[in-house]
Image (spheres, grey):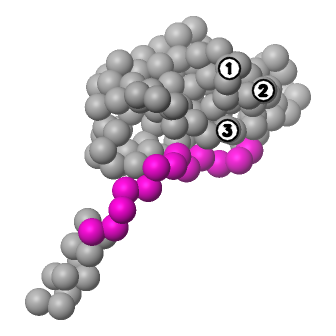
Amino acid sequence: MMGTLLGWGWLLLPVCQALVVPKKVSGRAGEMVSLRCWYPRGYEGYKKYWCWGASSDACCKVVETVGEEVPQQHGQVSIQDSHISCVVLLTAEYLSEVDAGSYWCGVERMGRDLMEPVTVRVVPG
């Protein structure tokens, strides 16, 4: 009985309202880089997106989901949402120096979106 209580105890914890992303990622020019963004349970059906810009208030969406687990692609960038793992995967192919900079993982919701920054560095090939 005690093991069962401990095993299900995480259900009683308050839902965290934050995204978890690496602070920095690097990729080589001409190659591919992937970024993962973990989101809290309860946001599985919400739209997720990646945007580019120096601040969360002034970033431009690069690619977004439609609230489902269907992969979406825009040019050389794709996004996929895994509801089971609560993780959004962004993949950018054929990196170039212009792809470097600040990106934001976002979850669209009423009020202010959940957003967290990632710095992408492109190393010359």
- Front-lying residue, 105 or 27: 105
Q: Is residue 1 on the magenta stretch?
A: no
Residue on which disc 2 sits: 54
Q: Secondary structure at mark 3?
A: strand
Q: Is residue 69 left or right of residue 90?
A: left
Q: Residues within 10 Å of mark 2 (few under 14, many from 20)?
A: some
Given contact means CB atoms under 8 Å apart, are the residues at marks 3 and 2 in contact?
A: no
Q: Which residue extends farthest top?
A: 75
Tell which circle, 1 or 3, labels the residue nearer the N-terminal end: 1
Q: Residues within 10 Å of mark 3 (few under 14, many from 20)?
A: many
Q: Residue at x 52, y 42 (%)?
A: 37
Q: Give above or below for 112 relative to 52.
A: below
Q: Residue at x 70, y 19 (%)?
A: 58
Amino acid at dot 2? Ala
Question: Residue 75 location in percent, x, y?
Answer: 57, 8
Question: Residue 73 location in percent, x, y?
Answer: 48, 14
Question: Residue 28 location in percent, x, y?
Answer: 78, 32
Q: Is residue 53 left or right of residue 71?
A: right
Q: CA distance from mark 1 to mark 3?
A: 11 Å
Q: Secondary structure at mark 2?
A: loop
Tell which circle, 2 or 1, labels the residue nearer the N-terminal end: 2
Q: CA distance from mark 3 to mark 2?
A: 9 Å
Number of the label disc, if any, that sits on residue 59: 1
Number of the label disc, if any, that sits on residue 34: none
* Residue 48 seen in the figure: no
Q: Residue at x 54, y 42 (%)?
A: 36
Residue on which disc 3 sits: 117
Magenta span main SS: loop
Amino acid at dot 3? Pro
Q: Quadrant of the C terminus?
A: top right
Q: Quadrant of residue 31?
A: top right
Residue stretch in magenta: 12-24
